[in-house]
Image: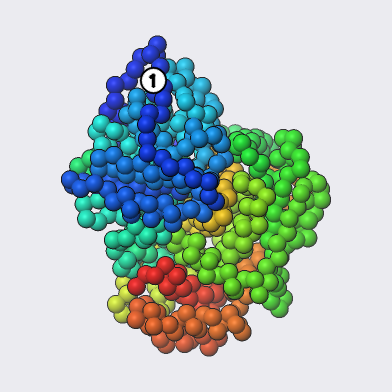
Amino acid sequence: MVMPEDAGYPPHPPSITPGRPESPRGNGPGRYAIAPRDNDMCGICGEIRFDDDTPDTAAIQRMVDQMTPRGPDASGLFQMNRLAAGHRRLKIIDLSEHAQQPMIDNELGLGLVFNGAIYNYPELRQELSRRGYRFFSHGDTEVILKAYAEWGADCVQHLSGMFAFALWERDSGRLLLARDRLGIKPLYYAESGGALRFASTLPALLAAGDVDSTIDPVALHHYMSFHAVVPAPHTLLQGVRKLPPATTLLIEADGRRQERRYWAPVYGVRDDERDLSEDDWRDRVLDGLRTAVKRRLIADVPVGVLLSGGLDSSLIVGLLAEQGQSGLNTFSVGFESVGDEQGDEFRYSDFIARHYATEHHKLFVDSATLLPNLQACVAAMSEPMVSHDVIGFYLLSQQVARHVKVVQSGQGADEVFAGYHWYPPLLQSEDPLADYARVFFDRDHAEFARAVTPAWASEDFSRQFVRDHFAQPGATRAIDKALRLDSNIMLVDDPVKRVDNMTMAWGLEARVPFLDHELVELAARVPAELKVREDGKYILKQAARQVIPAEVIDRPKGYFPVPALKYLQGEYLDFVRDILDRPAARQRGLFRAEYIDELLQAPDQHITPLRGSKLWQIALLEFWLQTHHIH
């Protein structure tokens, strides 16, 4: 069962005249302003004005151009009255020009820009055809248009996949912004001067101009304390917000708006499932995974796999092989070791590649490669991402994009199936907030106040956020509260965002079967004891035993945090010192000089509970601000 967080607004029928089934609806794209270009996954952007001015199409074009890597295959721009929209396209489904965007249906009076993939679009297309709609393309984009014409804003309830889109009604001027349930696809927006602009990336909004780039104090606290996770709607910039996952934002032509969360999984066993055995749960999880992986094969181009050699990605390879995939391309990345800290897990990925006879590609990143590419990696970040392996995803995606346009990734399994070390203690926790914060927070509030200059010292926003989230209905036990927080908040604004930004930097689409929303709903109902047993992900491991070799399942849990960015020394320490000593950093004055000096004197002694470098964290924030010319 899925429990809406609030009743929200009712389904809003579009202001069009719905035809009758015997009179086919939406039978042509009409005329629209598109300039296809053959360049280098999708990016969307646009502007809606609430005054008598027309949108700044030059600003829209700057946003389109800034997102070229996300959609290297084509671009388009549409403007009518007080709305303009732009699009960059990566051709994955329906490679013809019929699926070009912005997509306009003049008969329905609707337009759309869309980023993502709707995996159930063939079934939806059949259903909508039975209801009288006629299609002019063969992909998933047009299905969203027809779904909105039929169901209004509730069309999102019918979509299975990852998506962020902006859909507008020609006659009313109404605009709908929407984001998928797990926030796999991003959507940012900024308001100023009687207009609202939106884009797939924060740098695109900066390229458009007129953005308040003041640091957001709430976001700064989250970045420094909540393991660099900045939950929606905040970003580090006061003038840029992001639409939360599982949310629609309906904007009227006069600027009035209604925001609604349309999905919130309930955690805990359902009454009708209390008699299920361990084997029953195992079989349900395996069936759910098979469905999730199969759904993500929908594409008109080959699909590969990012293979770390761990349980999650190995299971995806096994399930693909089970479904008859052969000659599968798999990809792994590893880094230089530092001391006893291992930097790669190639022995495990090699084992799976041999077992399933995949076309395996390995990328080894040495220090000579890593450092020169950091600037470009940070430029690809919509928000600063402190995780050490982000540079690995960036460089690996560059290599992967030379072979395939779509990859499946094991991201999300640890959050959804309880693979982290902080979950088992929460089974019996009497103070879940304190127990969670102790293992997950990078700093307590006292250290935060000691790290930042007095102007940025603030209340304990991060602890309050977790307290409020834990208090929401839909999860009773401490462990379920933590799993819900991690799956719906932390996962969205750390691993998932990292994968999207780094793959899209090279025109590569990443699909994440562990974040299939029906699988997440199922996992939320699995008894917590069956998830955390035996070092975590127990029920997933039991399901995996039906598919892949035990050697991969029973191996020690892997973790390779790019040691060079964890134990900063030599040229890396010099690099960090230079960033923090630049005039821009000193003028900004975010951090106390004595705190920076303390970290610089002994970087390896200042490691967070989650084994990250506190020095790299503050340096990365400053580096991101400088890279994006934020003053």
Element under label 1?
Answer: loop
User: Is 260 left or right of 133, judged from the image as shown?
Assistant: left
| Vertical placement of residue 241 versus 543, above or below | below
Residue farthest top in this picture:
22
Query: How far from the left and from the top, in percent, is residue 383?
Result: 44, 62
Query: How far from the left and from the top, in percent, is residue 390?
Result: 57, 63
Res. 334 image quadrant: bottom right
* Residue designated by label 1: 25
Residue at point 38%, 44% (across, down):
77
Closest to the observer, 602 or 550: 602
Residue at point 55%, 84% (across, down):
574
Query: How is the protein colored in the picture?
Result: rainbow
Residue at point 58%, 65% (across, down):
391
Does residue 296 appear in this view? yes
Question: Local crowd at mark 1 within 10 Å, few (<14), some, or many (≥20)?
Answer: many
| Vertical placement of residue 576 versus 526, above or below | below
Residue farthest left in this picture:
52
Q: Amino acid at mark 1?
A: Arg
Query: How far from the left and from the top, in percent, is residue 14?
Result: 30, 29
Closest to the observer, 345 or 506: 506
Does residue 540 appear in this view? no
Count of numbered badges drawn on the protein: 1
Closest to the observer, 267 or 211: 211
The C terminus - image quarter: bottom left
Query: How far from the left and from the top, in percent, is residue 468?
Result: 36, 55
Residue at point 57%, 55% (across, down):
506
